[in-house]
Each structure stands twice: as C-alpha cells, then as structure tokens.
Image (tube, rainbow, N blue to C red):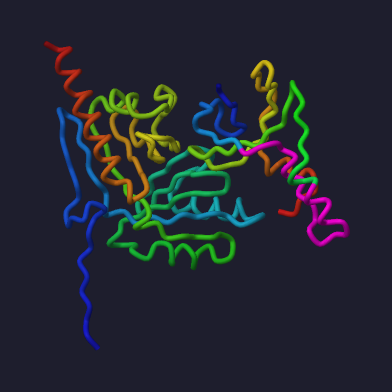
Amino acid sequence: MLINHPLLGPRDAQEFTYLGDASLLNRPDGMAGGAAQAFHDYLYLRDNPTGEHRELWYHEQGDRSWLIVTRNVSTHEILKVELASDVALSQGAKP
Amino acid sequence: MSEIRLTQITAFGRVEAQTASFGDVTLTERPDLAIASVAARHGQESTVRSTLEQMVGGALEVSSFREGNRFSAFWTGPSQWFVMADHDDYETLAASLKETLSRAASITEQNDGWVGFDMDGTDCDAVLERLCNIDLSGFTSGRAQRTVIEHVSCFVLCRKQGCAYRIFCGRSYALSLWHALATTVASATAVAKLATH
C-alpha cells in the first residue's frame, strides 16, 4: 500500500504507523461542564462503519508528521491524504 | 582545582574514526561533525529557514540538503532541520545557533545523539538499493530522506548522485548499522567483481 504524502509524495505504508480514527483530534475540553461524560464518549464510543474511514497515520520512518488518510476499508483505496496539523488548524485548534 | 582531561571517543569506543574499503567503495565514520537539530517555533518558520539558508548558502526546502563553506543543513520534517559543522571549530554549535535564532527556534545538541557515515565510490547505488527503499533515480545531489536500513531509522543525504552519500543513525545503533553497511558493500562489490569475470 502506498500513501501519497502531501509533502513527500508516494511512500510505502511500512514507513507509517496507524493510530486510530481521525475523530481522536476532537478531544473534549477537560475544564468544560459535563467533561466526564464527554471523555467517556470520546474514549469508549466508536463508530465502525464499512467503506470510507478517516484515519490518523504517523510517518514514523519519514518526516514524523501526522496525516489524516481517508481510506475505503472495503476496497483499500486511498482517497485523500492531508496533514493533520492543517486539518486541526482549519477546525480552529490552537497552534 | 584539579584539571580534568577527557579523551573523546567515537560511537565505537575508539579514538580514531571507523573506516573500511571494499573494491572502490569506502565507508568512513564522521565523528568530526557537530550536529544540532533546529525546530522553528510557531509562526517563525520563514525567519528560521532564511537564517539557515544564509548559513549554508542555498535553499532548504522539503527534502533538501545543502553544504556551505562552514555549515551544512538538511530538512528533517516540517519546520525542522539538522545543522552540521566541523566539530573542532563549532563544538558548541547548538549554543551558537541558539544565540542567533533566540526564541524563534528550539535547538537541541545532537553531537552524541547521531552518528554519521560517508559512503564514497563509483557505484554506491548498488549498495543503497539493497539497503533501503529510496527511489534512487530521483534521489539527486542535494536531497535528503529519512528511511529504514536494517530496521534502523536513518537519514540518507545525497552529496553526489551515485557516488557520495552520508548516512546518519542514532548513535547507539552505530555498530548495527556499520555491520549492515559493511556487509552490503562487501556483497555488492563481490557481485560486481564476479560480473566482470
């Protein structure tokens, strides 16, 4: 499997490690009201659909950047690769 | 106050650099390089990059490696670089970079964190293609890539395509990487020699 790194071009999947679903980026605010319930849901509740997934991959044997890979888990087709930092910033994360 | 004199030793516990030659390929350990990692802080990427580019006299875009008169540097990741200089002249490279870049960058000394090896010869590609998955046809002079060699994470720098490369690995892997490099160079040289007979 090749992952088309946004900066470096196609790289072998063996250079990457997989963390989990990209929804992990949406970490709840621990200081807000209802934080305990929010963290419970964040930690334990997962969707597990077939088809397209957005996943966090780490380019460990490369430039050490975190990527969001949109991948169809039925066909293994990779549809989109983005830098996770770009996505997080566009969602209003603090740098 | 007593004067403490310490003898510098290489990653192999020796005083002299490790070298080996097989055919026309030479491997040389480079303990004479001072190394520092530079990571630009938020919003400071262009400041740090232009400072480093002035030091090495060339552009330091993604995957590039530049050798200047006194300093050389290569891209290691987004907003991050390794800077190298002669160890005798710039033993405190990290401290002097910190003075120059101040709060624009986070700098860590890597003198004893990484070990460098130079590989020189007429056909180093025959060796590298056995060791790692770098696309050597596009790996031209002035390019740098992080990759895996024998399960060891390495930076490979191209000084002259096909003929001169520099490879860095974590210092504690020096012996393992040396074994991989020397074995592969010996093997590739032997195969090339057999082919000529």
Check the image and name the residue furthest to the left.
B197
Check the image and name the residue furthest to the right.
A33
Against B181, residue B13 (above or below) is below
Which image quadrant is residue B96 in?
bottom left
Please state the extent of the stretch shown in magenta in the rendering.
Answer: A19-40
Q: Is residue B175 left or right of residue B68?
A: left
Q: Give coordinates of residue B101: x percent, y percent.
A: 53, 62
Q: Give coordinates of residue B142: x percent, y percent.
A: 41, 36
Q: Is residue B55 left or right of residue B193?
A: right
Against B3, residue A59 (above or below) is above
Q: For residue A78: magenta?
A: no
Query: Which residue occupies the foreground of this view, B53 or A3?
Result: A3
Against A30, residue A54 (above or below) is above
Query: Which residue occupies the foreground of this view, B65 or B166?
Result: B166
Quarter of the C terminus of chain B within the rendering: top left
Q: Give coordinates of residue B12: x percent, y percent.
A: 22, 51
Query: Which residue occupies the foreground of this view, B73 or A6?
Result: A6
Q: Is residue B135 left or right of residue B127?
A: right
Residue at x 62% of width, y 55% of height: B44
Q: For residue A21: magenta?
A: yes
Query: Which residue occupies the foreground of this view, A26 or B170?
Result: A26
Which image quadrant is residue A54 in?
top right
Check the image and name the residue furthest to the bottom.
B1
Which image quadrant is residue B36 in?
bottom left
Tally the marks. Answer: 0
Quarter of the N terminus of chain B within the rendering: bottom left
Q: Give coordinates of residue B153: x percent, y percent.
A: 41, 40
Against B184, residue B58 (above or below) is below
Residue at x 30% of width, y 59% of height: B87
Residue at x 38% of width, y 29% of height: B132
Residue at x 78% of width, y 51% of height: A39
